Image (cartoon, rainbow, N blue to C red):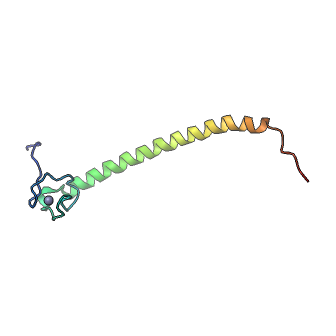
């Protein structure tokens, strides 16, 4: 298996930017399936992407919760230290 093999579009003979897309993203011609990732490879790549997105989402959520907590920790004492708003009625 030659990993340096270039996957060229049969129409414009430019390297395929994405082997996920069924069309050449330069000239728009349909690319032969043998140049694209197989169903299995695509499924694996999607699963990896999904796992990656999920991990990022969990990380962001943890960060957001930590940020919310630190905001609460800093805002609440400030809020309670303020004088109650005066009524104008
Ligand atoms: Zn092309």
| Nearer to us in this view, 27 or 51 | 27
Please give left or right for residue 7 compared with residue 71 in the image: left
Measuring from the top left, give residue 60's x and y in whole percent: 48, 43
Name the residue at 22% across, 59% down: 21
Asked whether 32 or 9 is in front, the reply is 9
Q: Residue at x 51, y 41 (%)?
A: 62
Q: Compared with residue 24, is residue 4 higher up or lower down, i.e. above or below? A: above
**For residue 83, what is the image quadrant?**
top right
Residue 37 versus residue 56 in the image, above or below: below
In the rendered view, does 69 fall on the left or right side of 47? right
Q: Image quadrant for the N terminus? A: top left
Q: Position of residue 65 (x, y in %)?
A: 56, 41
Q: Position of residue 10 (x, y in %)?
A: 8, 59
Front-most of residues 56 and 24: 24
Tell me how many marks there are: 0
Position of 30 relative to 46 (above/below)? below
Q: Farthest residue toward the right?
A: 89
The residue located at (71%, 38%) in the rendering is 76
The picture quadrant for ligand 1 comes to bottom left
Residue 59, how many percent across, how many down?
46, 41
Q: Is residue 74 left or right of residue 52?
A: right
Instruction: Please indicate whether residue 52 sits to the left or right of residue 13 in the image.
Output: right
On-image quarter of the C terminus:
bottom right
Please name the residue shown 84% across and 42% down the image.
Answer: 84
């Amino acid at each position: 298996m030659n990993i340096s093999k270039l996957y060229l579009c049969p129409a414009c003979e430019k390297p395929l930017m994405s082997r996920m897309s069924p069309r050449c993203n330069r000239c728009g011609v349909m690319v032969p399936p043998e140049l694209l990732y197989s169903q299995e490879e695509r499924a694996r790549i999607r699963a990896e992407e999904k796992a990656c997105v999920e991990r990022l989402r969990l990380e962001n959520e943890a960060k957001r919760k930590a940020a919310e907590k630190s905001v609460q920790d800093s805002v609440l004492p400030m809020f309670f230290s303020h004088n109650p708003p005066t009524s104008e009625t």
